[in-house]
Each structure stands twice: as structure tokens, then as C-alpha cells.
């Protein structure tokens, strides 16, 4: 049985909306698919995405501490292009 969510799950967006060369947002670390229609996604799917984000942040932070940025989650040098559909 699924656990009842008493509070709405937060949107992890921090307002730094820029995708890297692998399609992950530099600010919140979500893929385009994970960002698209966040508020319409079922609670279970949003919870799964939030757990994935914790893992991505941990990998990114560990790589930074080791002195080697995780290129799959870091920004590339392309200019900012706003994503009007997320």
C-alpha cells in the first residue's frame, strides 16, 4: 500500500533553467521529460523523480569534492536558451 502524502511534493526548480549537453537542467538536475508538466504528474512519479535528484546531487557533489566535475550533470558552454515548454 502506498504511503499517504500529507503535503504536496515541492517543485525542485530553483530558477536556473539551463540545460547541459546531456539534457539535464543545471539548476534542478531534472531531464526535460522530468520537468515537463510537473504539477500534473502523479504523486508517485514526482516522488520517484525527487529520489533520483537526490542521487544525482550526491554523485555531482562527490565528483566535485574529488576534483573532477561529473560531466553528465555539469553545464556546458553553450549560450542560455530558455525552454518555453517546461
Image (cartoon, grey):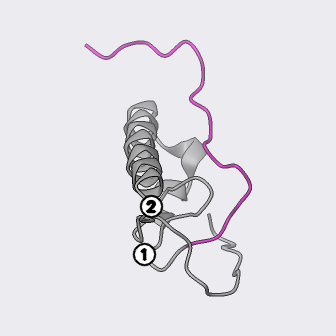
> Does the magenta segment cover residue 16?
yes
Quadrant in the picture for residue 55: top left
Query: Which tag is nearer the camera, tag 1 or tag 2?
Result: 2
Who comes first in sequence, dot 1 or dot 2? 1
Residue numbers of the magenta segment: 1-19
Q: Residue at x 41, y 64 (%)?
A: 70
Quadrant in the picture for residue 80: bottom right
Front-lying residue, 53 or 9: 53
In the structure shown, which secondary structural element does the residue marked by tag 1 occupy?
Answer: loop
Where does residue 21 sit, x and y in percent of width and height? 48, 80
Q: Is residue 82 above or below residue 67?
A: below
Q: Is residue 68 above or below residue 9?
A: below
Q: Residue at x 62, y 87 (%)?
A: 78
Q: Is residue 20 above or below residue 13?
A: below
Secondary structure mostly seen in magenta is loop
Most extreme residue toward the front, as rendered? 67
Give the position of the N terminus as an image quadrant.
Answer: top left
Front-lying residue, 77 or 4: 77
Q: Which residue is mark 2?
A: 67
Disc number for residue 22: 1
Q: Is residue 49 above or below residue 69?
A: above
Mark 1 and mark 2: Cα distance apart in space: 21 Å
Give the position of the C terminus as an image quadrant.
Answer: bottom right
Q: Residue at x 41, y 43 (%)?
A: 58
Amino acid at each position: 500500500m502506498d504511503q499517504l502524502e500529507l503535503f504536496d511534493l515541492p517543485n525542485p526548480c530553483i530558477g536556473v533553467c539551463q540545460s547541459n549537453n546531456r539534457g539535464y537542467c543545471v539548476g534542478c538536475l531534472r531531464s526535460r521529460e522530468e520537468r515537463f508538466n510537473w504539477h500534473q504528474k502523479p504523486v508517485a512519479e514526482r516522488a520517484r523523480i525527487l529520489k533520483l535528484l537526490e542521487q544525482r546531487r550526491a554523485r555531482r557533489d562527490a565528483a566535485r569534492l574529488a576534483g573532477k566535475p561529473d560531466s553528465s550533470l555539469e553545464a556546458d558552454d553553450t549560450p542560455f536558451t530558455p525552454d518555453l515548454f517546461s
